[in-house]
Amino acid sequence: MLEFTLPDMSCGHCASKVAIACRLVDPRAQVDIDVGKRQLKIESPESRDDFSDALAEAGYPPTP
């Protein structure tokens, strides 16, 4: 399980963009988004770096 904190994610529209970014890395990923806590959990065999890069490109860079 990969876990990310996304400080720039603040609404449902943001969450939708985050989910799309994750699906571009792995269409079968299990994605759990908590907008209130600004947290993202992903179940996928793909690398953390791949998701981190995709999230940053979408405008939601995770905190280290």
Image: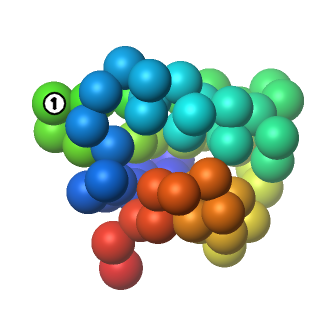
- Quadrant where the C terminus lies? bottom left
User: Dividing the picture into quarters, in which one does residue 50 lie?
Assistant: bottom right
Tag 1: amino acid: Gly
Q: Is 16 situated above or below 21?
A: above
* Percent of width and height locating residue 10: 25, 37
Tell me the residue at 44%/40% (across/down): 41
Q: Is residue 55 left or right of residue 61?
A: right
**Name of the residue lying farthest toward the bottom:** 64
The figure's colour scheme reads rainbow
Q: Which residue is mark 1?
A: 36
Q: Is residue 42 left or right of residue 13?
A: right
**Name of the residue lying farthest toward the left:** 36
Q: Is residue 9 visible?
A: yes
Tell me the residue at 16%/30% (across/down): 36
* Residue nearer the viewer, 61 or 49: 61
**Name of the residue lying farthest toward the top:** 12
User: Dividing the picture into quarters, in which one does residue 12 lie?
Assistant: top left
* Percent of width and height locating residue 14: 43, 33
> In what element is the residue under mark 1?
loop
Q: Is 43 situated above or below 2?
A: above
Q: How many marks?
A: 1
Q: Is residue 48 left or right of residue 59?
A: right
Mark 1, other Cα within 10 Å: few <14 / some 14–19 / many ≥20? few
Q: Is residue 8 left or right of residue 26?
A: left
Q: Is 58 situated above or below 28?
A: below
Q: Is residue 32 visible?
A: no
